[in-house]
Image: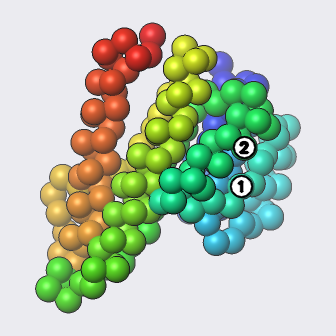
Amino acid sequence: MLKGKTAVVTGAAKGIGRAIAERFAAEGCNIVLNYRSKVYEEAINNIKSYGVECLAYKADVSRFEEAEALIKAAKNTFGNIEVLVNNAGITRDMLAMRMSEAEFDDVIATNLKGAFNTIRFASNIMLKQRSGAIINMSSVVGLMGNAGQANYAASKAGIIGLTKSAARDGDNGSFP
C-alpha cells in the first residue's frame, strides 16, 4: 500500500522521528528525512537498507521559506508527497514565572508554526494529487498541561486545534 510512495518526516534525524521514518521505509516509502542541526549517517543507511530512496534535507521548519524549500525539494526529488509527518519538536522547560520570552517563542515556533508551515505547502501538492495524509504529533500535555512546560503544552494544544481545523478545510471540499 505504501510501496513507492513518499513520506516527509520532520525532525527525523533521531528519536521518534527517526523511528517513524524507518517504519515508513520498511513499508516501502521513499523518505525525506528533515533535520535542523545534525543528521546521522546511520539513520540514512538504515532507511536505505529497506531498498528505498532517502533525501536528507536540512531545514528549520519554523522558518516559512525553509519549510517551503523542504516541501519543494521533496516534490522535485520524488514527484509526489503522499505523507507528511510533522514530528519536529523541542522543549525549553522552565516554570512560567521564570520562562524567558525566547524560551516560549522558540518552542511555539518549532512545534506549532513548523507544523503550520509544512502543512501550508504540502497541502497544495496533496490537493493537486487529490490524495495525501498529514500526521501531526502532539502530546497529552497539550490537553492536561504540565508544570514547567507552559510553552510546550501551548504548542501541543495548538497542534490539536491546527489539526482539527486543517481536517475541516479538507471536509469543505478542498480534498477528496
State if disc 1 and disc 2 touch (CB < 8 Å): yes
* Image coordinates for residue 60, horizontal then vertical, percent: 57, 62
Identify the element where label 1 is drawn.
Answer: strand
Residue in view at x 41 percent, y 46 percent: 116
Q: Quadrant of residue 167?
A: top left
Tell whether 49 sits left or right of 140. right
* Image coordinates for residue 101, horizontal then vertical, percent: 28, 80
In front: label 2 or label 1? 2
Tell whether 71 sits left or right of 111. right
User: Furthest residue to the front?
Assistant: 65
Residue in view at x 47 percent, y 39 percent: 119
Residue 108 lies, with reference to residue 101, above or below; the image says: above
Q: Of the residues under marks 2 and 1, which one precedes in the sequence?
A: 1
* Image coordinates for residue 135, horizontal then vertical, percent: 45, 38
Label 2: which residue? 73
Dividing the image into 4 quarters, which one contains the C terminus? top left
Q: Quadrant of residue 92?
A: bottom left
Dividing the image into 4 quarters, which one contains the N terminus? top right
Label annotation for residue 57: 1
Residue 143 lies, with reference to residue 77, above or below; the image says: below
Q: Nearer the viewer, residue 141 or 120?
A: 120
Q: Nearer the viewer, residue 74 or 148?
A: 74
Task: Answer few, some or many: residues within 10 Å of disc 2's Cα (few below 14, many 20 plus, some between 14 and 19).
Answer: some
Spatial separation of the CA atoms under disc 2 and disc 1:
8 Å
Identify the element where label 2 is drawn.
Answer: helix
